[in-house]
């Protein structure tokens, strides 16, 4: 409710600021209505709330200069990566300048021996994994969209691999960040163990762009598994599917991905992705490890699923089949929206202990 008068009382950018930004960036400063609207909207149900200008920066020095100018004129700043947010992170509710870092998309240093990489914030997860081809390593955080790493760190993204590999919180080792007044800080480091000083890295990860604009990130890499197998299994009820998940985790099976989808979402996916999945509560699994280890895990998961009424167990070992399966899962948002033509989706997180998950979904 408080946002309405704020939006109505937005003040235009000072001419002196626009002039200074124009001298700094030239044609990479835009006040075009279409560019501003694009940068004030995302995939959420919320309508666009555009900034007053968009600054396309290409270096740490430009971020510092833009931030210093905005700070001197008391003007808000909104960092922008790839615009794939589902929750309105990009809305310029008090106007201001959008700092678009998508042009800062260089992979600075891959260190296979140390299993880490330093990147600029506009690098996307698919771009990074393509660059890692042939190293035997990969970056596992997969929120679905081809998001920028700066945005993923800013929102503490997770995704389907979080069960085994954690979220961005566990995978960002350090960063170079520009504070609101243009000061630069470097946090964290590449050492895997350190207890010196404040843990500023984990203060900034998840801060949603409210504390700093990221100019450089160092993130962990992980070994590519020798064997990967994905599967889908249906259950008579959501509760039985959840009980299967709980028991699988309690048995110590190193599940890489595990996703629960209810019957209505399966119906939506079938219509949208042209799949033929059985319309029942379903679990999507993925197992990583050695050939023998994955075979052993498959048998354990199958036994657990059978105990809880699981049926139609279908394994996908070929990369093409696994990709098809997980792409269908990633399409669930758009598939659900397509069930109600003309409507938009209100997305949020409902986080409960796993023992209460079935109850939460039923409610």
Image: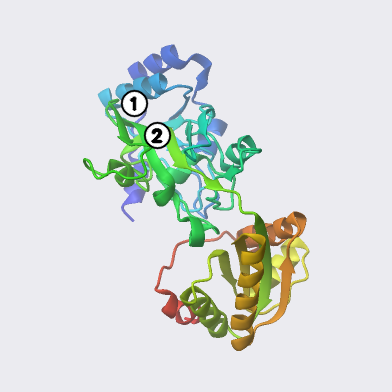
Foreground of the two, 237 or 181: 237
**Horizontal and vertical percent for residue 33?**
53, 31
**Horizontal and vertical percent for residue 362?**
50, 81
Q: Is residue 196 left or right of residue 25?
A: left
Q: Secondary structure at mark 1?
A: helix
Q: Is residue 166 left or right of residue 20?
A: right
Q: Is residue 291 left or right of residue 161?
A: right
Q: Nearer the viewer, mark 2 or mark 1?
A: 2
Q: Residues within 10 Å of mark 2 (few under 14, many from 20)?
A: many
Mark number for residue 214?
2
Q: Residue furthest front?
A: 292
Mark number for residue 67?
1
In this rendering, the answer to whether 227 lies above or below 254 is above
**Horizontal and vertical percent for residue 253?**
53, 70
Q: Residues within 10 Å of mark 1 (few under 14, many from 20)?
A: many
Foreground of the two, 291 or 74: 291
Q: Secondary structure at mark 2?
A: strand
């Amino acid at each position: 409710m408080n946002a309405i008068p704020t939006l109505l009382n937005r003040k235009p950018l000072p001419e002196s600021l626009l002039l200074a930004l124009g001298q700094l960036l030239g044609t990479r400063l835009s006040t075009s209505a279409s560019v501003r609207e694009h940068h004030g909207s995302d995939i959420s149900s919320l309508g666009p709330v555009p900034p007053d200008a968009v600054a396309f920066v290409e270096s740490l020095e430009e971020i510092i200069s833009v931030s210093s100018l905005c700070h001197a004129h008391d003007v808000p700043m909104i960092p922008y990566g790839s615009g794939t947010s589902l929750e309105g992170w990009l809305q310029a509710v008090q106007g201001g300048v959008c700092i678009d870092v998508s042009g800062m998309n260089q992979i600075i240093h891959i260190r296979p021996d140390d299993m880490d990489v330093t990147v600029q914030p506009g690098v996307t997860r698919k771009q990074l994994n393509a660059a890692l081809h042939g190293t035997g390593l990969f970056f596992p955080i997969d929120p679905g969209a081809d998001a920028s790493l700066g945005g993923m760190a800013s929102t503490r993204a997770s995704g389907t691999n979080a069960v085994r590999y954690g979220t961005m919180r566990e995978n960002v080792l350090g960063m170079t960040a520009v504070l609101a007044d243009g000061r630069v800080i470097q946090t964290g480091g590449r050492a895997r163990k350190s207890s010196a000083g404040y843990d500023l890295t984990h203060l900034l990860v998840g801060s949603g762009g409210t504390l700093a604009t990221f100019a450089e990130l160092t993130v962990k890499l992980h070994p590519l598994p020798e064997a990967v197998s994905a599967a889908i299994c249906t259950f008579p009820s959501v509760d039985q599917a959840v009980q299967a998940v709980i028991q699988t985790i309690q048995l110590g099976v190193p599940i890489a991905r595990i996703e629960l989808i209810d019957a209505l979402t399966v119906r939506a996916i079938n219509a949208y992705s042209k799949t033929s999945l059985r319309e029942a509560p379903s679990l999507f699994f993925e197992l990583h490890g050695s050939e023998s280890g994955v075979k052993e895990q498959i048998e354990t998961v199958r036994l657990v699923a059978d105990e809880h009424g699981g049926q139609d167990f279908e394994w996908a070992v070929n990369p093409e089949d696994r990709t098809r399966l997980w792409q269908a899962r990633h399409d669930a948002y758009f598939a659900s929206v397509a069930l109600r033509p003309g409507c938009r989706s209100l997305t949020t997180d409902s986080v409960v202990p796993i023992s209460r998950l079935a109850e939460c979904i039923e409610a």
